[in-house]
Image (cartoon, rainbow, N blue to C red):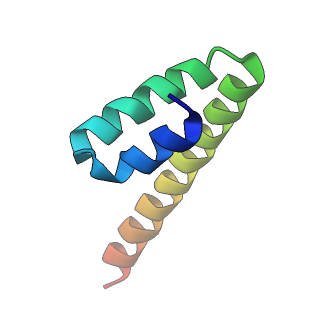
């Protein structure tokens, strides 16, 4: 099956099946150290942003 054929079939899959495919593709991509490092860096950035939002929400609650 070609990549084009696979991509054409993706919209027909359930959300659970698409999620499973994403997980497999991510695992394959993470075998590349550069991709794994990029994903780790993005995750750390997202976590930092979440902490900043939580602090801002806490501060807003204290000021009221």
Q: Closest to the observer: 48 or 9? A: 9
Q: Quadrant of residue 3?
A: top right
State whether residue 43 is above or below residue 54: above
Q: How many marks?
A: 0
Q: Residue at x 51, y 45 (%)?
A: 47
| Residue that lies at the very extreme toward the bottom in this rendered image | 64
Q: Residue at x 71, y 18 (%)?
A: 32
Q: Residue at x 46, y 69 (%)?
A: 56
| Residue that lies at the very extreme toward the right in this rendered image | 34
Q: Find residue 53 and report its horizontal and vertical position in percent.
A: 47, 63
32 relative to 5 in the view: left or right: right
State whether residue 38 is above or below residue 59: above
State whether residue 10 is above or below residue 59: above
Q: Find residue 48 and report its horizontal and vertical position in percent.
A: 57, 48
Is the C terminus in the top left, top right, bottom left or bottom right quadrant?
Answer: bottom left
Q: Quadrant of residue 2?
A: top right
Q: Closest to the observer: 23 or 7? A: 7
Q: Residue at x 41, y 60 (%)?
A: 54
Q: Quadrant of residue 55?
A: bottom left
Q: Find residue 43 and report its horizontal and vertical position in percent.
A: 56, 39
Q: Closest to the observer: 56 or 20? A: 20
Q: Closest to the observer: 12 or 19? A: 12
Q: Find residue 52 and report its horizontal and vertical position in percent.
A: 53, 59
């Amino acid at each position: 099956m070609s990549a084009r054929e696979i991509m054409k079939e993706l919209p027909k899959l359930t959300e659970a099946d698409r999620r499973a495919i994403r997980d497999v593709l991510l695992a394959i991509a993470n075998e590349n150290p550069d991709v794994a490092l990029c994903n780790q860096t993005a995750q750390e950035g997202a976590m930092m942003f979440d902490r900043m939002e939580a602090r801002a929400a806490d501060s807003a609650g204290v000021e009221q």
